[in-house]
Image (cartoon, grey):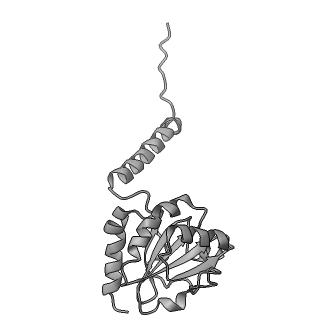
Amino acid sequence: MSSETETPPPAGRRLFVLLPLLIFLGLAGLFLSQLLSGRDVSEVPSALIGQPAPPTKLPALQGSNLPGLDSKTFAGKVTLVNVFASWCAPCREEHPVLLALAQDKRFVMAALNYKDRAENARRFLGDLGNPFQAIGVDEAGSTAIDWGVYGVPETFVIGKDGKIAFKHVGPLTAEAVQTLLLPQIEKALAAPG
């Protein structure tokens, strides 16, 4: 009987076998740390926060008797810019919240009407009420791209210095207004213009 000794597999082969397990454990650790961080994973960061609002000069919504959206009018006052469309169901859901916000006269509420037909937007505002003091029409959606819009609705807080102070993605709720939006508005109102 010959005594055969088994030779251990080469180190490279062991690493090849363990590599998928190491990658899996690394990714699992990363996902777990994100999950336990307490950060709102639905929050979409914007590179525009702290930057001047994009130069914007959109025509007014026909038949609304309101001016269009012009970024030059942001200077010296806090402005909320809401991106909406009549075909957007979440926009309809958030509309009562916008109407309530419009009662606060410390800031201006403006709108960017996104890829919408004028008659539909007018009907939407006629049926639900109009919280806006200016409505700019972005038929092609190119201005929304400049603003970094992911979808509708979205709401921006523009400070008195004309810079974007805050961005909320998705429909505003009463809770989001109290916990997120109003503190940002207060901060923008307190900042020098």
Residue nearest the observer in this picture, 158 or 115: 115
Work out whether residue 78 can be spotted. Answer: yes
Residue drawn at (66%, 71%) of the image: 119
Residue at the spot 37% in from the left edge and 83% down from the top edge: 105
Determine whether 96 is above or below 20 in the image. Answer: below
Q: On the rendered structure, is 94 left or right of 146?
A: left
Residue 84 drawn at (x, y percent): 55, 69
Which image quadrant for residue 55? Answer: bottom right
- Observer-nearest of 123 and 137: 123
User: Viewed as shown, does residue 123 lie left or right of 181?
Assistant: right
Q: Position of residue 154 (x, y in %)?
A: 50, 68
Residue name at image x 59 percent, y 77 percent: 146
**Whether residue 116 can be seen here:** no
Q: Is residue 121 above or below residue 110?
A: above
Q: How many marks?
A: 0
Q: Residue 13: x, y in percent?
A: 53, 35
5 with respect to 186 (left or right) = right
What quarter of the picture does the C terminus occupy? Answer: bottom left
Q: What residue occupies the far front of the structure in this picture?
A: 127
Name the residue rendered at 56%, 65% in the picture.
150
In the picture as drawn, the residue positioned furthest to the top comes out as: 1
Asked which quadrant contains residue 99, the reply is bottom left
Between 14 and 156, the one nearer to me in the picture: 156
The answer to whether residue 166 is left or right of residue 121 is left
Q: Residue 142: image x %, image y %?
A: 65, 75
